[in-house]
Image: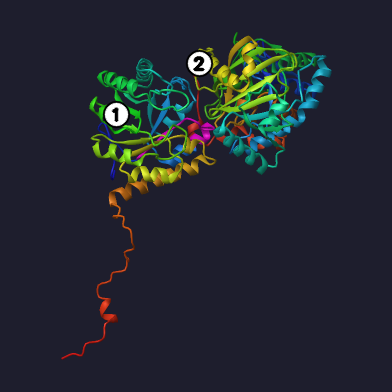
Amino acid sequence: MPGSSAARTTDVVVVGGGVIGLAIAWQAALRGLTVTVLDPAPGSGASHAAAGMLAPVTEVHYGEERLLRLNLASAQRYPTFAAELTEATGRDVGYRQTGTLAVATDADDRAVLADLHRFQLSLGLTVELLTSREARRLEPMLAPGIRSGLLVAGDHQVDNRLLATALLAAAVAVGVDVRTDRAAGIVTTAERATGVRLGDGDTLAAGTVVLAAGCWSPQVAGVPTDVVPPTRPVKGQIVRLRGPAGFLGRNVRAVVGGTHLYLVPRADGEIVIGATAEEQGYDVTVRAGGVYELLRDAHTLVPGIAELELTETYAGLRPGSPDNAPMIGRTALAGLVAATGHYRNGILLTPATADAVADLLATGVEPEVIRPFSPQRFARERVWSMRVTA
Amino acid sequence: MDDPLVIAGEAFGSRLIIGTGGAPSLESLEQAARASGAEMATVALRRVDPSARGSVLDVLRALGLRILPNTAGCYTAGEALLTARLAREALDTSWVKLEVIADERTLLPDPVELLDAAERLVDDGFVVLPYTNDDPILARRLEQVGCAAVMPLGAPIGSGLGIRNPHNIELIVEAAGVPVVLDAGLGTASDAAIAMELGCDAVLLASAVTRAREPALMAEAMRKAVEAGRLARRAGRIPQRRFAAASTPSEGALHFVQPAQPQR
């Protein structure tokens, strides 16, 4: 910036060092761009809170068919993405092709599961319907009372915390400058984003700014009101237990009394149980009721968890979006690209988002796969135009 | 406004009140709220922070809906009072949908705690709209302690079973001096129409719309059903009878089959 002695120029500045921002930085640097990432605590937000379930098929919802296609594409990319990351860093990211078993706990929830099964089949997805007995043969720790199961052999998992650490290492290894400065605001010159103003007042000039600050994206100043991505925090409380390895063989999920629950078993015996979904602003207080309900429902499903060690209770903030789908691509402000609002699917969508945004940054052409998820799709709706100050 | 719903002196053009629980996304909630034509929406204050931006409250406000905070998730009168007071402070409204449930399995109201909470909230200056069992006596007691409406259930929350005891709903309607709002248990449009035909003044529903495959379509169906049921109630249904009664007038037809009388 003219007049600023501290001005430096890079091709890309990424605001936000969660898995999305770090993966974009890594992939952009691999394509020959100079990249800086700004985050006071990289990998500490939703990337740290998540469970790492990669379950596009069991996670499918009515009205979200477009999102399903992106989710499936990203799931398909995962094995090579994880392998490349391990090769680049020497770190394992806990990518496990274990499959997912969805079960019902009573007749009402069984009807919900049957409805999901019909929907999955109508979408051409591969799902196997099991009896209670067949489900319990696969997962002997399941309660005797469970009713039927859906086995999705293609829904997997990754250890999101290992993933974040590995992405940080991979980015640094290819020359990404990861700085713990806070991005105070986007600098615009002649209706174009030209850099980022840092917390200490310095300016970092950049060819393109990537806004990947999750639910904090609307708090980055300097973005015109109608360009601000309409993300909001959706609080999730989550519990971690430690048991013997192999206690559960695969992801187990269920609808218990109408609410969704999942248990994700790591190779080392850790079991991640989640998660609540609460509209509580930026509050990350762990509450007794949230933990109680998770453990109560998990105990209904897998009674044996009562004997496991309770190692962590945690609350994180998912970056929610109006239609539950992410905002990826060019914004209405030239020079500003968004990659945020991934809501429940941030870990799953990391490879697809990173590939697409890095391609966009390197070639200037927006890949077909992200077109339905343009950040500009909400622009005409006054109701989504916001400036978050909370 | 023709045939308004009046609660505590305030008039509403729509007789459909929506709940927000179970909406798959904010966008789907926004589309459903528009399609429903509702002017009031109830929100669980335990699940939504009123100061958070971009949340369900902002969406409802942008659409111009009146927010009716509710005390969902409370098991005791004490909790309900605390929640209602927090809501009044945060949302600057003295209106509250009072919900005091007995257990998680049925989510049925606890009548003893409900009446206690209603009385104390009314005394504290609240406009109280209690979610109640379909019990005519309890409804009367709630009216007697000063509730602005009574809101009997059709069936347990989220069950979609429709109105299980229409006779009790009729008894409540006949005796009530305040609006009766059928709240909870509706599954589809005909359930809403039946509620209005039974004489309810309005319908409050959430899951039937938010958990439908196409929430906005179901919201439109519910709007039309509530309007149709209200019109039918005002028009007055015909008495039911065991055998047919031809709808074509029979007077003047008889001479056709009688032999012609020679004129004198």
Circle 1: residue type: Leu
Whether residue A236 can be seen here: no
On the image, which quarter does residue B11 sit in?
A: top left
On the image, which quarter does residue A321 sit in?
A: top right
Residue B90, how many percent across, how many down? 38, 19
Residue A33, how many percent across, how many down? 77, 22
In magenta segment, residue B58: no
Question: How many angstroms separate mark 2 from mark 1 (CA)?
Answer: 30 Å
**Disc number lying in front (2 or 1):** 1
| Mark 2 neighbour class, 10 Å CA radius: few under 14, some 14 to 19, many 20 or more | few
Whether residue A144 can be seen here: yes
Identify the mark at residue B116; answer none if there is no mark.
none
**Position of A209 relative to A5 (above/below):** below
Give the magenta part as a residue range: B15-30
Circle 2: residue type: Gly
Lateral position of residue B198 relative to residue A95, left or right: left
Q: Which residue is mark 2?
A: A289
Identify the mark at residue B138; answer none if there is no mark.
1
Quarter of the N terminus of chain B within the rendering: top left
Q: Image point 68% across, 30% down: which residue?
A: A133
Question: On what subunit does the disc labeled 2 rest?
Answer: A
On the image, which quarter does residue A96 sit in?
A: top right
In magenta segment, residue B17: yes
